[in-house]
Image (spheres, helix red, strand yellow):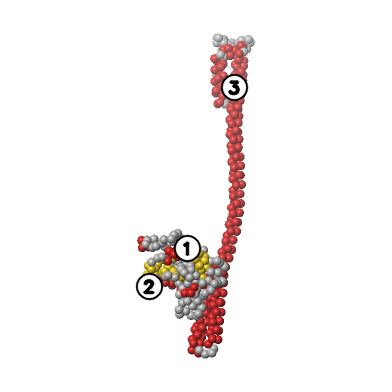
Amino acid sequence: MLVPHRHKMAIAANPASGGWQKSFNQQTYNSGKSNAGLFPASHMVSEGNVGKEKNGRTPSNQRSAYLISLTFGALLCFLLNATIEASKSRTALEKHMERMAEKIVVLKHEARRAHALEIEGMRVEEELEIQKAENRRLWGLEVEQQHSLGKMEHDIRRLEEAQKEKDEEIEELFDIAWEEVQERKAESNRLRGRNIHLASDVLEEHFRELTYNIQIQSHEKAMEKYGPGPHRVAIKVELPEDEVFEGLNMTGIGLSEDTIVIELAPLDFMPHSIQIFLDQVSAGLWNDCVIFRNANHILQASPDFAGEKMMQAFVDSGLDSVKFQEYNHRFPHEKYTIGFGGRPGGSQLIINKENNTELHGPGGQAGHFGADDADPCFGKVVSGVDVIRWLSAMPTIENDNRSLMQRYIRIVSASII
């Protein structure tokens, strides 16, 4: 059988060529048919004729041809392997490039997102700047308003101080005039001469002038503080609900409320009394006072029977009495009207249960100064008549003909409505 000449040959190649060299040698030695196709017949020698000449070729030429073929095959395998390696490298490079392209796409997306966030951040910053500017503007307005309020409060305090000084001046003038009237009256009583009537007329004229000035001042104060009216005041009372009063004869009363609503007279009729009463109500002085008297003709409320502190509050505020006994014939003491009782009036509130024009009108109270002296009447009950009727039915205790209630009725509140 013919086989290739088996000379061991060392071929200098890259270490990576070991694979193709081993494959080439195996193909060469394992297939005689393939060897016949790969190597010419002239290169094939028998095992018994190795070293002999054949077709004129020496063994040296055959070895050279074999080496050339072997070298060519090795180069071919090397190139093939290099091509495969290059293809793998190119495939790996392409995959790497694809990954890089995907990363670039992701980076571009992140860049766009970062750009959008940057734009949004700039917009937010602009809005914050706008808001800061608006806050500064509002703060400026607030400071300006506070300054204006401070100025207004200062002006109000100044006006109140001026009004207080004016009131004190009027009161001082009234006291002086009153003393003068008393002195002149005493003098006129002593003299009882022909000039007595003239002096009395002068004094009365002077007194009327002073009271008129007081009314003008009160009218101005009431108009400024409470407006022209009509003015209304709600007086809420605390009605007892225990067994002590279960026996009261309340048939036909049908009580459904505990508030008395009073509409005051026109301000032009009784300016001084109305101004005093509204100031008392506005200051809360009638709150927690009591209705203590249930006479046949009136109900009477006062701070005196509610404790010393209650009356002291009237005195401290300067609202414990009127400066003179104001009265107007156009607003008499008719049924369900209210006024001030006592001398001087101011801290005793009366509710007329009947027409008391004669008793509490001009000259109705014995020992009063002047023929026209009367109790001020300045309001009328417009709601809560049932409450008055209920109070009028409550039991009393006679004490110096005053008909005091067995239990005082507390005034929960008095308020301007």
Which residue sits furthest right?
Answer: 56
| Residue under pointer 3 | 77
- Kind of residue at disc 1: Gly
Crowd rating for badge 3 (residues with CA inside 10 Å; few <14, some 14–19, many 20+): some
- Nearer the camera: disc 2 or disc 3: 2
The tally of labels here is 3
Up/down of 81 relative to 329, above or below: above
Q: Is residue 249 positioned above or below 356 on the image? A: above
> How far apart are the alpha carbons under marks 2 and 3?
145 Å
Task: Determine the CA span between mark 1 and mark 3.
Answer: 126 Å
Which residue is at a point 61% across and 25% down the rendered structure image?
83
Q: Are the residues at dot 1 and dot 3 in contact (C-beta closer than 8 Å)?
A: no
Q: Residue 48 at x, y = what percent? A: 55, 9
Query: Can you tell which of label 1 and label 3 is closer to the viewer?
Result: 1
Report whether 337 appears left or right of 62.
Answer: left
Identify the residue under disc 1: 384
Q: Quadrant of residue 298?
A: bottom left
Q: Which mark is residue 399?
A: 2
Q: Residues within 10 Å of mark 1 (few under 14, many from 20)?
A: many
**Residue 198 in view (yes/no):** yes
> Looking at this view, is 415 or 155 the one in front?
415
Say whether disc 2 or disc 1 marks the residue closer to the N-terminus.
1
> In which quadrant of the rendered image does the N terminus lie?
top right
In depth, the one of 289 and 60 nearer the eye is 289
At label 2, the amino acid type is: Asn
At horizontal 47% and vertical 67% (from top left) the residue drawn is 284
